[in-house]
Image: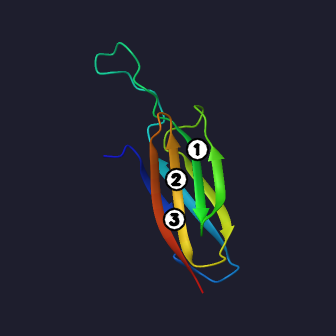
Amino acid sequence: MSDLTTRITMPQNASKGDIIEIKVLARHIMERAIDAVGLKPSPRKIIHTFRVSYAGEEVFRMDLSTGIASNPYMSFTTVATETGVVLFEWLEDGGARHTRVQTLIVS
């Protein structure tokens, strides 16, 4: 089970050339935890990179640090150029990679 849940808000359809807004809320603890015994910290599970590709090209990238609060929220715009996949990717300390995919249909 993933320790990341997301809410992605974006249009499903757009006209070519439209500027679309994409909003992303990632529910993630963004903190270091203590092991069950409470003696030593377990490995960090902090998202360090969030990136978004649309139709195979990166359109947004954000490098995160330990100063970012739990449940980071991002909002950005891009131009609708063609029908394609929007790939959302979160990279976490320790090598975990979380992805979500949505499709934008451009007419």
Say which residue label 1 marks: 49
Q: The residue tagged with tag 3: helix, strand or loop?
A: strand
Disc 3 + disc 2, Cβ < 8 Å: no
Seen as rendered, the residue at the extreme bottom is 107
- Residue drawn at x 38%, y 21% as measured from the top left: 34
Q: Looking at the image, how many numbered discs can be counted on the residues?
A: 3
Instruction: Give the amino acid type for the residue marked by disc 1 in the picture.
Output: Thr
The first of marks 2 and 1 along the sequence is 1
Could you say where residue 44 lies in the image, as x and y percent from the top left?
A: 46, 29
Residue at x 59% of width, y 70% of height: 55
**Left or right: where 23 falls relative to 61:** left
Going from the N terminus, do you reach mark 1 or mark 3 first? 3
Q: Is residue 13 visible?
A: yes
**Local crowd at mark 3 within 10 Å, few (<14), some, or many (≥20)?**
few
Q: Secondary structure at mark 1?
A: strand
Give amino acid for label 3: Thr
Badges 2 and 1: C-beta atoms under 8 Å apart?
A: yes
Residue tagged by mark 3? 9
- Element under disc 2: strand
* Mark 1 and mark 3: Cα distance apart in space: 20 Å
The image quadrant of residue 43 is top left
The amino acid type found where label 2 is placed reads Glu
Q: Residue furthest top?
A: 39
Please state which of residues 9 and 32 is positioned toward the viewer in this rendering: 32
Q: Which mark is residue 33?
A: none
